[in-house]
Image (cartoon, rainbow, N blue to C red):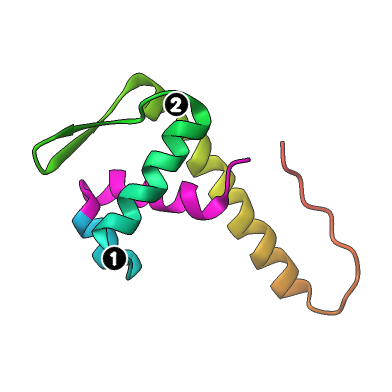
Amino acid sequence: MLETKQLRIFKTVVEVGGFTRAGQRLNLSQPAISQHVRALEKELGVPLLLRIGKATRLTPAGEVLLQCATQVLDKLEEVQRVLAEDGDGRATIVRLG
């Protein structure tokens, strides 16, 4: 099952352009970042990133995942924000689709 942590790490690698910089931004080691991305690729059964020296490029599957991950992470942030604003314990309707 996909984990939000993996999606955040993948998205950060793409945004900053590499594993080392993603590790610096997320306060994780470069090997830990690589392990999370490899686990994600293994789970999905497709390569997501082309590693060219220290640079990375998205594969077609990586482009699809980036779009989906961005939508999922944005929705999760919206849910957290709405629930934090509501704060009185009443149910709030959040549209996910």
Does residue 75 lie above or below 26 as drawn?
A: above
Q: In the picture, which quadrant includes the N terminus?
A: top right
Residue 59's spot in the image, x, y percent? Answer: 31, 24
Q: Mark 1 packing: few (<14 Cα in 10 Å), some, or many (20+)?
A: few
Q: How many labels does the image show?
A: 2
Mark 1 to mark 2: distance in Å? 23 Å
Region in magenta: 1-19
Q: Would residue 45 be seen by someone viewing this image from the given angle?
A: yes
Q: Residue at x 24, y 66 (%)?
A: 24
Mark positioned earlier in the residue sequence (1 or 2): 1
| Residue 10 colored in magenta in the image | yes
- The residue pinned by badge 1 equals 25
Residue 73's spot in the image, x, y percent? Answer: 54, 50
Q: Magenta region, mostly helix, strand or loop?
A: helix
Find residue 64 and name its label.
2
Does residue 71 lie above or below 22 as drawn?
A: above
Specify whether 49 is left or right of 45: left
Residue 96 lies in quadrant: top right
Task: Give the amino acid type for the residue marked by disc 1 in the picture.
Answer: Arg
> Foreground residue, 78 or 43?
43
Q: Would residue 66 be seen by someone viewing this image from the given angle?
A: no
Q: Which residue is drawn at 38% across and 43% down?
A: 37
Q: In the picture, which quadrant includes the C terminus?
A: top right
Q: Is mark 1 on a helix, strand or loop?
A: helix
Task: Give the amino acid type for the residue marked by disc 2 in the picture.
Answer: Val
